[in-house]
Amino acid sequence: MEIGLFISALAIVYLIPGPDMLLVLHTSSSQGRGHGLATALGLGIARGLHVALAGLGLAALFTAAPWLFDVVRYLGAAYLVWVGVQLIRSRHSADSNHHQASLLNSTNKCSTCGF
């Protein structure tokens, strides 16, 4: 019974449109259906991994070892800072539009972007 409730709650949350849907729509409209499907596949794999880790008790591990949660949190913050610096640096380059287009020019890169 509890697993059914867990899966139902996940289905409801994942069906609500959000930034993931905007990413798929943008990729599909600018680069075609194949790239959009690759992005959706990457998003699906990421969500599946998230659900699997949640189901395996990652929250219990973080409760038992709070320092591990802090490590993951600081790594996430460092990643966001890195992404911000890359964004600022790309705005200063003369060919930022060309750089952005080259980042998403293959289906493998689209699925990685979705992940």
Image (cartoon, rainbow, N blue to C red):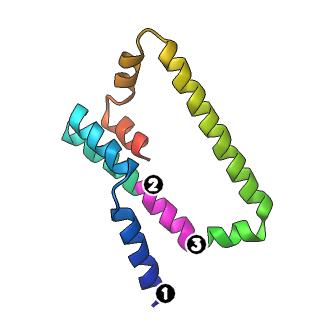
Please indicate whether residue 26 sits to the left or right of residue 73 in the image. left
Residue pictured at 60% horizontal, 26% vertical? 85
Residue pictured at 64% horizontal, 45% vertical? 76
Task: Give the image location of residue 1, x and y in percent.
Answer: 45, 91
Residue 67 is covered by the magenta coloring:
no
Is residue 113 in view? yes
Cβ atoms at labels 3 and 2 below 8 Å apart:
no
**Which residue is labeled 3 in the image?**
56
Of badges 1 and 3, nearer the viewer stands: 1
Query: Outermost residue, bottom direction?
Result: 1
Residue pictured at 27% horizontal, 43% vertical? 25
The answer to whether 88 is drawn above or below residue 21 in the figure is above
Residue 4's quadrant in the figure?
A: bottom left
Residue type at mark 3: give it: Leu
Q: Which mark is residue 39?
A: none
Question: How far is mark 3 from mark 2, CA to CA?
Answer: 15 Å
Residue type at mark 2: give it: Ala
Predominant secondary structure, magenta span: helix
Crowding at dot 1, Cα within 10 Å, few <14 / some 14-19 / many 20+, comes out as: few
Residue type at mark 1: give it: Glu
Q: What element carries label 1?
A: helix
Task: Give the image location of residue 107, x and y in percent.
Answer: 31, 37
**Which residue is labeled 2 in the image?**
46
Residue range of the region highlighted in magenta in the rendering: 45-55
Relative depth, front residue between 94 and 61? 94
The answer to whether 104 is drawn above or below residue 13 in the figure is above
Q: Which sits earlier in the primary sequence, circle 1 or circle 3?
A: 1
Crowding at dot 3, Cα within 10 Å, few <14 / some 14-19 / many 20+, comes out as: few
Relative depth, front residue between 37 and 92? 92
Q: Residue 2 carries which label?
A: 1
